Amino acid sequence: MSETATRAPEKSGGIRELRKLFAGGGRQYGILGALVFIIVFFQIFTDGKTLDPINLINLINGNAYVLVLAIGMVMVIVAGHIDLSVGSVAAFVGIVVAQVMKGLSFPGLPEGMSSFLTVFIGIIVGLIIGALVGAWQGWWVAYVGVPAFIVTLAGMLLFRGANQFVGNSTSIPVPQEFKFIGGGFLNDFGPDFGFSNPTLILGALVVVAVIWQERRSRVAQRKMGADIAPLWVSIVRLVVVLAVVVGATLLFATGRVGTSFPIAGIILGVLVLGYSFLTNNTTIGRHIFAVGGNWRAAELSGVNIRKVNFFVMANMSVIAALAGMIWIARSAASGPGDGVGWELDAISAVFIGGAAVSGGIGTVAGSIIGGLVIAVLNNGLQLLSVGADRVQMIKGLVLLIAVGVDVYSKRQGRPSIIGLLTRKRGGELDVSPGAKPAGTQTPTPSAGGAEETVRPPDQQPRG
Amino acid sequence: MKKIVIATTAFAAIAALTLAGCASRAPESGTDSTAGASGFAADATIGVALPDKTSENWVLAGQLFTDGLTEAGFKPDVQYAPATGTVPEQQNQINSMVTNGAKVIIIGAKDGSQLSTQVEAANAAGATVIAYDRLILNTDAVDYYLAFDNFKVGELQGQALLDGLKAKFADKAAYNIELFSGSPDDNNAGVFFAGAMSVLQPKIDDGTLVVVSGQTAVAQTATQGWLAQNAQSRMDTLLAANYQGVELDGVLSPNDTLARAIIESVKSAGKPLPVVTGQDSEVESVKSIMAGEQYMTIYKDTRALVAQAIVMVQDLQKGNAPETNDTESYDNGVKVVPSYLLAPLVVTKDTAAEVYAGNTSLEPLTK
């Protein structure tokens, strides 16, 4: 092992180091590159309107519900299932929440308290209904064994009808106070620097967290004796990430007075962090990948497959409930046409984000990036006044090409476009054991055994 | 050493974050949107957000807006919502128009109750919002409403149905009819139906008209999404359930697309054609009327409506308040929206040539 560690850098030099910049997730960085390209493209062609603060806020508020759905959907797809019912479940929960809040009144209480209670009860009721719907669908999938495709196809009809039944096929408005979760902003406070202060604080928190995380991972790598990237790699990565964070913070902080980073965006951020942790660092999270990759093997290794399937399906409906509430908050009303086609938006985000159709592969962060690719594309084309017909054609092609490139590069035995590029530049180095892609090397007791334990990156479950 | 480098990076980042205090936030836009007090540039961007292309009228309106606004010297930004994800995409489109600096945004809403956040943002950015054909509900950010008088449309349809029945079945004393209404998420659908029922209900009560299925409530007669397929399948069901051995004499249909679907359903059931009402003067329905199938339609000249919308934009550009002729009827739940209403016209086989005179696409069909 020490031999590989010392020999590799002198043979491959900068390329190996460069790879460590994108430690682990080559596939994700390919689609991230596409996102950056699309943003730059539209920024140029819309005369800078794409990165206008108000446009960015619209982008987040207008797509938060799809991105939230994508978080649940990637777990469903990784586990080898599909959920077609999310749009209908979101619409059903939305209409029930709107009805409940419409019917609530607290005569004895002061105005503020009463509206707080109304909103609070509305959200709790929504989440509970989501959980019940999820338990229903999860039970059919996990314990009866009906394929998720069928269960959720039934759910799609069932809950669409339920939405129209509850709402009498009409739109029901939600109270003004409820709108904050879908279109609200943090209240500004403190002295006026010409920025939204809460957004600045939020940005500073993210900066600290990013630095702490980078440091922690270096410490952990050193402690485990893993192959540590040189310091300059860490610094470059930090600088790039921090530049993006600071840039975004400044943009979001300079919107119209009264705006800040949107609350829907904060909800989304918390969910992304939470579910990334769940899928990467917890037993149940890793079991999802195990079941999706090879359920027979997973079962033989003692994974409770039913539990995993039940969890994944139930969780999806709770997330759909949340998405439904974010949507009705943004729209200020719940209508009979809500949620139509959302399942397909979420599924495309997940696949553009690098998930495998056969299950076992996919990441929360990748799916969010995939969703953002579609969102930015949609927004940019709308800013350019491209008609909805052509926008749909373009979105269809992007989905096909993104997944096509992914499938093609996997067949090449490389994880991504970046993998392809670096392989060409690495040339003949591939023959030496030291030229295995960075990040896949695992410390093993004997030098001879290292060869067998290194799996090609595309077969590795990715977090 | 390493710690120092990391700390420096962090410090630099935070410093950049705090030091950039020179950049100031865009202030609340100063222009007073409600009266368009000061007007705006003669070549300003005008946003037109239309729903999905479910009827020929919307397709025509988009074309007329693009041409008319360009001719008047404005920069038109005309966008249709797609057929799927219609409401969210229409919201996004309105936001894009605000970002593009539109001074007036004309909105043909898909669902008038789900756009309040967006029109409020438009208002806050200084744009004037005109609800076109469909009222936007539950917000005070709608400045004007421009439409045909929809209650009148309903009344005309109801009256025409009665007249048609009397003319076609002169020997009968009572007529069997069925009722259809539009999509429940469209505010107009209820207004059409209420207008029609204001004429028909007294006749149902006195027994002149018999709704055999008994379905007379708006919810029962609704056609989700104004979709022809929904009307057709409901008609199929009604015929199978209620008209075995009973004759159907008339159908109240809120528009042409649904009227043709209903006629299609009756034909495939092998029944004689009833008197069917319509609205919108779609090309296919005008042909159908001339062929003696559909009984009537309503002509709401999209050209006149678009022309009026452009006149309103021009008034706003000069800083004048646009003309309105109804400041009482259209309450959107938060405020009464000042409205300009145009009068609709009834078209039957006998009057078609006269009404469509001068309309290049419809006039030839009447010859």
Image (cartoon, coloured by chain):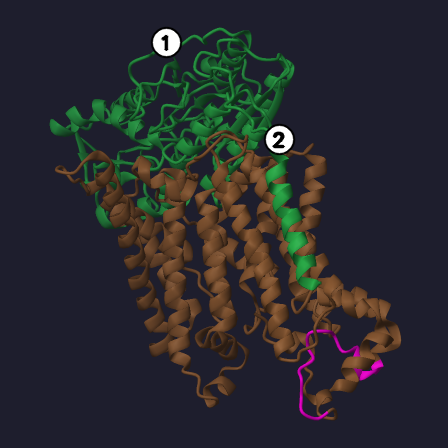
Chain colours: A brown, B green
Can residue A241 be seen from the camera position used here?
Answer: no
First in sequence: mark 1 or mark 2?
A: 2
Point 22% across, 22% down: residue: B199
Residue A352 sits in quarter: bottom right
Q: Judge whether A27 appears above or below B329 on screen.
A: below
Q: Which chain carries label 2?
A: B
The answer for how far apart the CA atoms under marks 1 and 2 are is: 46 Å
Q: Nearer the viewer, residue B266 or B300?
A: B300
Q: Nearer the viewer, residue B146 or B228?
A: B146
> Is B48 inside the magenta-drawn segment?
no
Q: Mark 2 points at which residue?
A: B23
Pinpoint residue A86: horizontal percent, then vertical percent.
41, 57
Q: Judge whether A3 appears above or below A78 on screen.
A: below
Residue A231 sits in quarter: bottom right
Q: Nearer the viewer, residue A59 or B252?
A: A59
Q: Name the residue under label 1.
A: B325
Point 50% across, 47% down: residue: A202
Which quadrant, please, contains the N terminus of chain B?
bottom right
Magenta span: predominant SS is loop
Q: What stretch is highlighted in magenta?
A: A431-446
Secondary structure, mark 1, is loop
Check if mark 1's residue and mark 2's residue have beta carbons within 8 Å. no
Residue type at the position of mark 2: Ala
In this rendering, position of residue B229 left or right of residue A360: left
Q: Which chain carries label 1?
A: B
Pinpoint residue B243: horizontal percent, then vertical percent.
24, 45
Pinpoint residue A235: horizontal percent, then vertical percent.
71, 59
Whether discs 1 and 2 lie on one chain: the answer is yes
Residue type at the position of mark 1: Asn
Mark 1 vs mark 2: in front? 2
> Is A442 inside the magenta-drawn segment?
yes
